[in-house]
Amino acid sequence: YQYLSRYKRKENLDHFTFVPGSVQGTERECLECLLEFCERSNPSWTELSNFTRFLNFQLRKYEESVFCSHLVAEDLRGF
C-alpha cells in the first residue's frame, strides 16, 4: 500500500524504503488503493491476496537488488 499510494500521488519512489510495522493510512484507504491497482472489475479476496503477495515479493526483490540501490545510482542513471 505504501508504494502504491505514493505512486498514485506521483511521488519519487527512488528514495523510499518500506518499513515493516509502519502503519500509514486507514484500512479503507488501503483496500481502495489495492482495488484500483489490482485492475480486476470485482476481485475476490483470493485474487487480492495473490496480487498483494506478488507485489510484496517484487518490491522486496527490488529493495534488495544492488542494481536498484543508491550505491550504483550515479553509474546507472536513467534506470
Image (cartoon, rainbow, N blue to C red):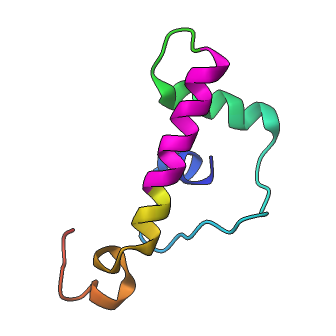
Residue 13 visible from this viewpoint = no
* Count of numbered labels shown in the rendering: 0
* Residue 72 falls inside the magenta stretch: no
From what the image shows, is residue 3 above or below residue 32? below
Residue 59 percent coordinates (x, y): 47, 57
Tell whether 27 sits left or right of 17.
right
* Residue 52 falls inside the magenta stretch: yes
Q: Name the chief secondary structure element in magenta.
A: helix
From what the image shows, is residue 11 above or below residue 63? above
Tell whether 68 sits left or right of 36.
left
Tell whether 39 sits left or right of 75.
right
> Which residue is rendered at x = 70% and y = 37% of the image?
30
From what the image shows, is residue 24 above or below residue 29? below
> Which residue is rendered at x = 54% and y = 53% of the image?
3
Q: Please state which of residues 67 and 15 is positioned toward the viewer in this rendering.
A: 67
Question: For residue 61, which quarter of the picture?
Answer: bottom left
Residue bounds of the magenta highlight: 44-58
> Which residue is rendered at x = 71% and y = 65% of the image?
20
Residue 68 percent coordinates (x, y): 33, 74
Tell whether 77 sits left or right of 13.
left
From what the image shows, is residue 49 above or below residue 26? above
Specify the quadrant that holds the C terminus: bottom left
Residue most extreme to the top: 42
Residue 49 visible from this viewpoint = yes
Residue 23 percent coordinates (x, y): 80, 56
> Which residue is rendered at x = 28% and y = 83% of the image?
73
Residue 75 percent coordinates (x, y): 18, 88
